[in-house]
Image: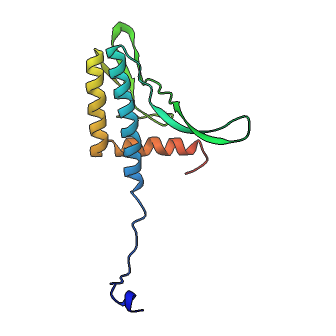
Amino acid sequence: MSTLAKLKFTAAVRKSGISPVQQRRNKLSNKLYEQIELARAQSEGRTYAPTRLRTVTDIDGNRKQMEMPKRVKTWWFVADGGRIVFNVRYGAKVVEFSKGKNAIEVASPAELIAALQAVKTAVEAGELDAQITAASGELRKGFGQA
């Protein structure tokens, strides 16, 4: 017992994690990063194909992890007049910036990248927390959760 007597004991509780608001910010920020990289790749004429690990069972029943390409859908489209319009999505739900305004319009691919970066900065600063929370609530309703 003399070995343990040399140690300092204390009552400590590990923090359970980050808040749900911060989790939603991080989720949307990561998705915006993917959209920025996708827009950069398209403007440079290359492809953007992030990978993720998937567990695959082969014919013999052995399970192994493989890197598989991850499908990233674009959040933007070309509207009438050649202007680029993009929505910000939280899961399958479109985030409304203000009442009836759910898209951002830009003139060129370079402006698209700048606008995506501005939205990402706003998300990380917490400026869109109310909109993200509303979209999250709508998304959870689809799963039968409140």
Residue 42 in the image: state x and y as whole percent: 37, 17
Describe residue 68's horizontal placement relative to residue 112 as left or right: right
Residue 128 in the image: state x and y as whole percent: 33, 41
Point out the residue furthest to the bottom here.
2
Describe residue 103's horizontal placement relative to residue 58 as left or right: left
Does residue 102 show up? no
User: Depth check: 39 or 10 in front?
Assistant: 10
Residue 43 in the image: state x and y as whole percent: 32, 16
**Above or below: residue 143 compared with residue 111:** below
Residue at the spot 73% in from the left edge and 41% down from the top edge:
61
Point out the residue furthest to the front here.
3
Residue at the spot 37% in from the left edge and 45% down from the top edge:
25
Residue at the spot 26% in from the left edge and 32% down from the top edge:
118
User: Depth check: 105 or 31 in front?
Assistant: 31
User: Depth check: 73 or 140 in front?
Assistant: 73
User: Depth check: 146 or 6 in front?
Assistant: 6
Task: Write down the quadrant of residue 82 in the picture.
Answer: top left
Residue at the spot 29% in from the left edge and 24% down from the top edge:
113
For the N terminus, give its image quadrant. bottom left
Does residue 78 show up? yes
Residue 13 in the image: state x and y as whole percent: 40, 73
Point out the residue furthest to the top here.
81
